[in-house]
Image (cartoon, rainbow, N blue to C red):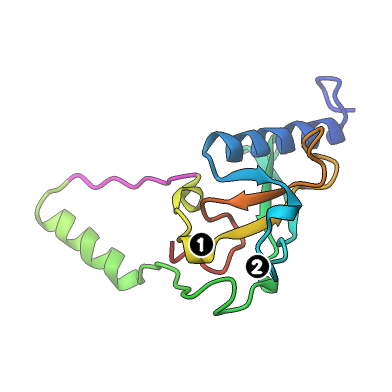
Amino acid sequence: MTPSGLRQWEYWITGTCDELCSLADLHVFVLVPHSELPKGKQPLRGKLVCKHRYDDTGKIVCYKVWYVTKGFAQRQGINYNKTTTPTAHLKSFQTIAHLGAALNWDLHQFDIKTAFLHGILPVEETAYMEQPFSFKVLGKEDWVMQLLKSIYGMKQAGHI
């Protein structure tokens, strides 16, 4: 038992519920009946990725859960058209830091926690995904998630 009296699995369930609520709040998907899938389209499978977050002393401070798609099942030309991942080279950071120091600029770094969940999928790349097992919406257990935005694990997520 953890100090607060909850077992670890209870933290993971809470984390999963938080993740699914976050996806719904960001309008990443809408639920549609399985019968509305276009002919030949199969819903992508997903999986829950669970990680602990630790503080400086090594104590667990967060039970983080992501619902990701198994993007390895996607096929180019069918499920997506382009893939790129915007990455910066070390030389780019060095140049900006040098300019900032030389011109006495204030430089700030920030991170967008849900950056991949803001990219809107083009209509021709509309994807469908299964609801997570054991977390299906009551009364809509056989429905699938029509993805309106990219989600972690999709081949085109970095491009979008």
From the viewer's perspective, tell me whether residue 83 is left or right of residue 79: left
Residue at (17% x, 55% y) in the render: 100
Binning the other alpha carbons within 10 Å of mark 2 as few (below 14), some (14 to 19) or many (20 upward) gives: some
Quadrant (top left/top right/bottom left/bottom right) for the C terminus: bottom left
Residue 47, given in percent of the width and then of the height, sits at 75, 55
Label 1 CA crowd tier, 10 Å (few <14, some 14–19, many 20+): many
Q: Which part of the image, by quadrant, shows the N terminus?
A: top right
Question: What residue is at 70 percent from the left and 72 percent from the top?
Answer: 73
Q: Position of residue 66 (x, y in %)?
A: 66, 47
Residue 4: quarter of image: top right
From what the image shows, is residue 146 above or below residue 158?
Answer: above
- Secondary structure found at label 1: loop
Mark 1 and mark 2 lie on one chain; the one further toward the N terminus is 2
Circle 2 — which element? helix
Distance from Cα at disc 1 to Cα at disc 2: 10 Å
Residue type at the position of mark 1: Ala
Magenta stretch contains residue 120: no
Magenta residues, start to end: 106-113
134 lies left or right of 54: right
What mark, if any, has residue 51 been given in the picture?
A: none
The main secondary structure of the magenta stretch is loop
Relative image position of residue 107 (x, y in whole percent) = 24, 47
Q: Which residue is drawn at 53% across and 56% down?
A: 150
* Position of residue 148 measured from the top left corner of the image (x, y, whole percent): 53, 50
**Do callouts 1 and 2 mark residues in contact (Cβ within 8 Å)?**
yes
Q: Can residue 110 be found in the magenta stretch? A: yes
Q: Which residue matches tag 1?
A: 157
Which residue is pictured at 11% across the width and 57% down the height?
Answer: 102
Residue type beneath disc 2: Gly
User: Which residue lies under the disc numbered 2?
Assistant: 71
